[in-house]
Amino acid sequence: MADAGEVLRLEGLRKSYNIGRPNEVEVLHGIDLRLDSADFAALVGPSGSGKSTLLNLIGLLDSPTDGELYLQGRPTRSMDDEARTALRGQHIGFVFQFHHLIGAFTALENVLMPWMVANGRPDREVTDIARGLLAEVGLEKYADRRPDQLSGGQQQRVAIARALVTRPSLLLADEPTGNLDTKTAAEVFDLLRRFNTRFGCAVLVVTHDPRLSEQCDRTVTLVDGNIVSDG
């Protein structure tokens, strides 16, 4: 069982590639980490430190070689793809450096997409939730615009609303401001912070920007596949 407030717990998480071959390599070497619902944390480290690998494991996009990952108290390592996909869709939201909006869809339809993938055609209640999220990110009047009719910052705001439409317990943000100017980046960061507080959604931000990590409540530093500091 998860402790009250616990969203994510990693115990001895390891990841290797090319297992059993001469070029086998272990990328993560026994990661222990816990995130609670109030956490707003940065994951930092040099290129090649294993950040992307760790993020893929936390996002249930890949499976560890050893150790266990608990999401909302549920062990996930032995889950099949279907169960892992369902759990990911229910509990994890993603925001990337490149927003990956679908060009043929409106802002509102893009926000609804994760819910539709998991549940099918949205009803009025869910659509109203999506419109409310667009209002939260300041884009209520742009609901019917396609991505090519929005600025880069506006598209990233749509991506944040999309990540939150299922009310996830964990939001993973991979370089979410890396493609934005300083002012827009600050606005996007403030949105993430506000949703962390308002919805009790744990946030883990992967970033190379020390200005961004310094604004987080907690910084987890990964070097050569090991957490070397967490504070």
Image (cartoon, grey):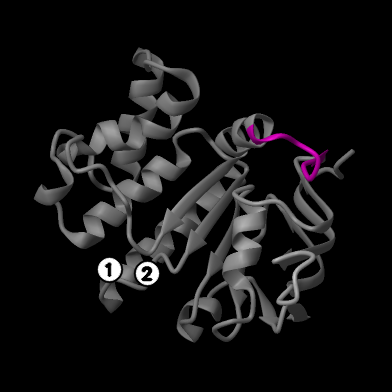
Is residue 231 something that shows in the picture?
no
Magenta-drawn segment: 74-81
| Residue occupying the point 36% across, 62% down | 188
Residue 181: quarter of image: bottom left
| Residue occupying the point 27% across, 74% down | 183
Q: Whole-percent x and y of residue 111?
A: 34, 36
Residue positioned most to the left? 149
**Residue type highlighted by circle 2:** Thr
Residue positioned most to the front? 22
| Residue occupying the point 87% across, 45% down | 3
Q: Where 170 sits versus 106, above or below?
A: below
Q: Whole-percent x and y of residue 172?
A: 54, 56
Q: Where 142 sits versus 184, above or below?
A: above
- Name the one closer to the observer, 217 or 48: 48
Pointer 1 or 2: first along the chain: 2
| Residue occupying the point 44% across, 54% down | 95
- Name the one closer to the observer, 7 or 15: 15
Question: Does the magenta-highlighted stretch encompass residue 194?
Answer: no
Number of numbered discs visible in the structure rendering: 2
Graded by Cα atoms within 10 Å as few (under 14), some (14 to 19) or many (20 or more), the crowding at tag 2 reads many
Disc 1 from disc 2: Cα separation: 8 Å
Q: Whole-percent x and y of residue 195?
A: 49, 49
106 sits to left or right of 44: left
- Dot label at residue 177: 2
Q: Which label sits in the foreground, 1 or 2?
A: 2
Residue 33: quarter of image: bottom right
For label 1, the residue is 184
190 sits to left or right of 35: left
Q: Main secondary structure of the magenta part?
A: loop
Q: Are marks 1 and 2 in contact (CB under 8 Å)?
A: yes
